[in-house]
Amino acid sequence: MTPAELGQRAELAVADFLFVLGFDVVARNLRLGRLELDVIARRDALLVMTEVRTRGPGSYIGPFGSVTRTKRARLIKAAQRLWRARSEYGWMRGVGRVRIDVAAVSFNGRETSVEYAPGALS
C-alpha cells in the first residue's frame, strides 16, 4: 500500500468514526490554496476540522508527535482561511463554533484503531 493509499484509508476511518459520533462529514481533503484540511465534519452549529495522522509500525515518532509546530501553524492558517471564505460553502451556514481536532489512526492487519483528540489545536 502506498503512503497516499494509507492516508486515504486513515481519512475514511476517521470519517466513519465521526459519523458514528453523530457528525455529517461535509468535506474531505479540502484545498485552500496550498493548504489542506483532511476531514471537515459538522454536528449542529459545531464544525470540526480534523487532521488525520498515521505512522507505520516501528516509526520513531507516533502520529500525535508528528504534528509539528509548523504543521499546527498551517492547520490554524487553513482554519482561518476557511472561516474567511465561509460564504463560499453552504455547509458553513449557521456554524457557531469551530474546533481543530487531531486523529491518530493505526492499522494492525484488518483491525483499524482511531485515537481522537478533540480540540487539540483549538
Image (tube, grey):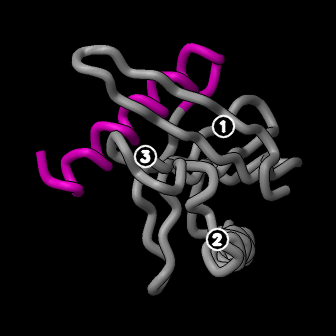
Q: Which residues are magenta?
A: 1-24
Quadrant position of residue 1: top left
Give the x, y percent position of residue 83: 73, 69
Instruction: Quickly name the residue at label 3.
Output: 54
Q: Amino acid at mark 1?
A: Arg
Horizontal side of 112 relative to 75 (left or right) equals: left
Magenta span: predominant SS is helix
Quadrant location, the C terminus: bottom right
Instruction: Quickly name the residue at label 1.
Output: 42
Q: Residue at point 53% right, 49% down?
A: 63
Q: Amino acid at mark 3?
A: Thr
Earlier residue among tags 3 and 2: 3
Q: Residue at point 67% right, 53% down?
A: 92
Question: Which dot, 3 or 1, sits closer to the camera?
Answer: 3
Earlier residue among tags 2 and 1: 1
Decide which of 25, 85 is in the foreground and name it. Answer: 25
Q: Residue at point 60% right, 29% down?
A: 115
Image height of 66 relative to 84, above or below: above
* SS state under label 2: loop
Give the x, y percent position of residue 70: 64, 81
* SS state under label 1: strand
Instruction: Quickly name the residue at label 2.
Output: 68
Horizontal side of 99 relative to 56 (left or right) equals: right
